[in-house]
Amino acid sequence: MSTATRRPTLAVWKFASCDGCQLTLLDCEDELLAIADAVEVAYFLEATRATVEGPYDLSLVEGSVTTPADAERIRSVRAASRRLVTIGACATAGGIQALRNFADVEEYLGIVYATPSYIETLSTSTPIAAHVPVDFELRGCPIDRGQLLEVVNAFLNGRAPEIRAHSVCVECKARGNVCVTVAHGTACLGPITHAGCGALCPSYHRGCYGCFGPSESADPRALGDELRRRGTDDVDLVRMLRTFNAAADAFRAESTRLERAPR
Amino acid sequence: MDGRTGRDEPDAGRGTPAVVVDVDGLDRMIRGLARAGYRVVGPVARDGAVVLDDVDGVADLPAGVGDEQDAGRYRLTGVAGGALFAHTVGPHSARRFLSPPRRTLWSAARDGDGFTVDGPAADDPPVALVGVRGCDLAAIAVQDRVRQRSPHPDPACASARARAFVVAVDCARPASTCFCTSTGTGPAAGPGHDLALTELTDAHGHRFVVRVGSDRGAAALAGVPWRPATAADLDAAARVVGDAAGRITRRLDPARARDVLAAAPEHPHWDDVARRCLSCANCTLVCPTCFCTAVEDVTDLAGGHASRVERWDSCFTLDHSYLHGGAVRGSTRSRYRQWLTHKLSTWWDQFGETGCVGCGRCIAWCPAGIDLVAEVAAIAGAPGESGP
């Protein structure tokens, strides 16, 4: 094969995560052959133990950094990657495991492990971008299959991905959904949550859980004021903001403020 | 039907004597429109709201369903009498069907060193909109004027609009969010319809006084039993509209709003709104006159095929004002001000009229309960007449 027709190499890396976002790539069933035609899958342990040495043209990184070893490893991944795209709430915001950022990890270790001294862990779970430069962050817990394809597609075609950072409300209205907050009184994070899921939960009459993290203009304080008026108390507001994107700046700042505010 | 029953077309045009059809007649009319090739869309109660969706006949319409609306709140209610149009406007409007949220404008395929372009898909079937209120009828006309102002009017939208059949209905139960009497767009359905109904549910039976607005409208009554409207029918219809108008308490003076907002670009109240506004874009996406769109280019993995897709956009997204280097309207304050000022003030400069038709959707469907009438009143320095 001549270098002119060499397929770009793709690597998929796992840090602290549940593997669900990597699995999304394997879930691209109808498009898998087209992907395999377009890229050389060089490193993807969830798919195959056969690996090709780097450097890699495109690295997809799943998971957050929670150990000193991973804080080192992400640097070598970055060094071996022409483009590095983080995928999922763990890699872009620290994930659900970032709840440790609000707690005492030493205390957890004593409760959970018989021999805490065997455990080497950091006191925080942090996104990849806190450690190395990242070319694009793809949000979601898990990521959306169509958006993952769009990111790979945009990379292959040398264009910017069509991924919008506006609210989930825009997707609800495009689908013709009836607003669950206005018409049902359901607490919903849609107005402050980054689009991408296609308004999945509101389409099934549930409030948005904020899986894609804060939208470009997220104002959790203003939404909290409104949800409080509709009967959600501060304890529940903190719980709503502290899920998969608990450590994302806008969500973290407001949940911390609420926790400190006198009740 | 009692009295003289016609099966021929009543004469079209303004000043044509109104006719009366019963519920079965309306059903026949809807089925007739479908047989004539229209996709018939009307009000349907679904998911806790009256939305617009495909209807086969009157059985699909929300009989006995009303609504209560307030800032940030919408609830369905039961209404005695079984009226089919006891509701007001829900979250959807004609815009959804005349310029849909997402559509492919054209696509291209790689062809050797060049490419070939495919135009848009063939026209969809024409839409027949049943139950369009006065405010929404006015909104369709506002959108028409916006489109006509463009040096490159979109042929697909123009075609969808030109082929659309409109069955308007006068409002009988306005919501607290309505202010069409201020904008001069309701509660009676104004011009622009093919047929306009006033629903009557009095002791003389469940029936509709029908005004014929076009030859197409007259043709649609061809297979429908009707009788001429009596003076009593017309009086009853006038009372429905008059009572509805009397129940509308929200007031906005469009001419004054234009001046107030034009003079207030740095009013401190914009900061107050910005503290409540979520920049979620709901107001713009339920507004029947908002027309902003964006285009996206979609490619396939192999790079052999690309298409250009148009989708609804909103001035509340950052990308909407993105120029090289960043968004011009980066703050929520600047985005809310842009929206309200365009809708109520600079729309006059651009299109010679207000951009607001008084439907109240932006008030009801704002999850933060922001009420544009109250905001204008606050900026004008007067207490909102029906706002907080």
Image: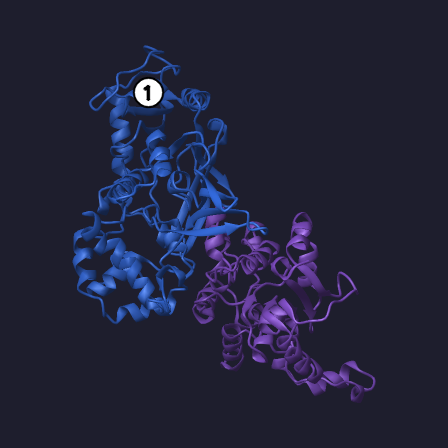
Chain colours: A purple, B blue
Against B135, is B292 above or below? below
Image coords of residue B152 (percent x, y) = 29, 43
In-front residue for pair A93/A180 = A93
Compared across the picture, whether B49 is left or right of B167 comes to right
In-front residue for pair A34/A182 = A34
Residue at screen point 70% across, 82% down: A67
In-front residue for pair A262/A175 = A175
Residue at screen point 24% across, 64% down: B378
In-front residue for pair A193/A43 = A43
Against B147, is B342 above or below? below
Q: Which residue is mark 1?
A: B20
Kindly tell me whether residue B281 is visible in this rendering: yes
Find numbered disc 1 in the image and state the secondary structure of the residue it sits on.
strand
Neighbours of disc 1 within 10 Å: few (<14), some (14-19), many (20+): many
Image coords of residue B369 (percent x, y) = 38, 59
Kindly tell me whether residue B70 is visible in this rendering: no
Compared across the picture, whether A79 is left or right of B103 comes to right
- Taking the view exactly as shown, the residue that stands out farthest to the right is A114
- Taking the view exactly as shown, the residue that stands out farthest to the bottom is A117
**At label 1, which amino acid type do we have?**
Val
Q: Quadrant of residue B155?
A: top left
Image coords of residue B286 (percent x, y) = 39, 49
Q: Quadrant of the N terminus of chain B?
A: top left
Image coords of residue A90 (percent x, y) = 63, 70
Compared across the picture, whether B337 is left or right of B74 comes to left
